[in-house]
Amino acid sequence: MHINNAVVLVTGANRGIGRAFVAELLARGAAKIYAAARDASSIVDDPRVVPVALDITNADAVADAASFAADVNVLINNAGITTFAPLVGGNLDDIRREMETNYFGTLAMVRAFAPALATNGGGSILNVSSAAAWLGLEHSNGYGASKAAVWAMTNALRVELSGQNTQVTGLYMASTDTDMIAAFDMSKNTPQAVVIAALDGLEAGELEVLADDETRTVKATLSADPVTTYPQAVRHIHTQAG
Ligand SMILES: NC(=O)c1ccc[n+]([C@@H]2O[C@H](COP(=O)([O-])OP(=O)(O)OC[C@H]3O[C@@H](n4cnc5c(N)ncnc54)[C@H](OP(=O)(O)O)[C@@H]3O)[C@@H](O)[C@H]2O)c1
């Protein structure tokens, strides 16, 4: 999949990683970029960039976008939210909102754009998930569950869309310097580094892009015994067993 001359739609394109996607797509020679955002007035101003007002949780807006941008051959599902809610003590409405945006919003985009991708030769989908899909934390587990759902969806779409020749790639990263985690003082990679890794992977035909070392370490825990990954749980079980 070449970005040069591609027609791309990016969701959540007004800030953070989505905005960095638009800049890097321009640098790689994309012919046209539909830059979708709830507030399209803050989209980068460039002759190759077409601002699109789009809330991915709004079914009518998603359908309108799919008919307006029928020439798309790369769909980048970047839009997402976190409320940092834990699963037990957190507000259930927050947890539902995360699932509604990150999972159902992304799925709605895929379902709406799959026919256009087929018409345009198959093309590519890049779904932005997170290392949080693969690790339980003290907080943000509603978000993690929604990103795990995106991971599962991404795997399944490769099978469902193989007949129409659509490449489906998942992007995973740990901590990137955007508004989303601005409140946390920690080591972060840059949005630019993440999108370079993502688009390098997409162009190379990779099905999964792990954008940093922390993410590669977390992914490796999936094949480890959970006893190693969650020692605190083992302590509790042993205490209960007496
Ligand atoms: N930053 C990290 O450390 C990190 C790590 C792993 C994965 N990610 C993922 O990377 C993606 C981009 O996040 P970011 O760090 O750039 O976050 P961000 O700075 O908070 O930006 C999130 C973007 O998503 C958009 N968005 C949220 N809900 C939407 C909706 N219903 N419809 C359309 N757009 C919506 C936002 O638009 P508005 O301006 O309208 O709110 C904004 O453009 C997300 O999927 C996030 O989960 C981020």
Image (tube, rainbow, N blue to C red):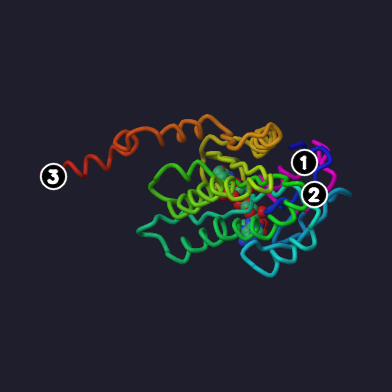
Pointer 2 with pointer 1, Cβ within 8 A: yes
Instruction: Please identify the quarter of the rendering in which residue 37 is found.
Output: bottom right
Q: Is mark 1 within 8 Å of ligand 1?
A: no
Name the residue tied to disc 3: 241
Name the residue tied to disc 1: 25
- Badge 2 local density, few (<14 within 10 Å), some, or many (20+)? many
Residue 135 appears in the rendering: yes
Q: Is residue 235 magenta?
A: no
Q: Which residues are drawn in magenta?
A: 15-35
The numbered mark at residue 46 is none
- Badge 1 local density, few (<14 within 10 Å), some, or many (20+)? many
- N-term mark: 3 or 2: 2
- The amino acid marked with disc number 1 is Leu
Picture mark count: 3
In this orientation, which residue lies closer to the viewer: 150 or 51?
Answer: 150
In this orientation, which residue lies closer to the viewer: 6 or 229?
Answer: 6
- The amino acid marked with disc number 2 is Ile
Rendered location of residue 217, percent (x, y): 46, 31
Give me the C-alpha separation between circle 2 and circle 1. Answer: 8 Å
State which quarter of the image contains the N terminus: top right
Rendered location of residue 198, percent (x, y): 65, 37
State which quarter of the image contains the C terminus: top left
Which secondary structure lies at badge 1? helix
Q: Is residue 21 magenta?
A: yes
Which secondary structure lies at badge 2? strand
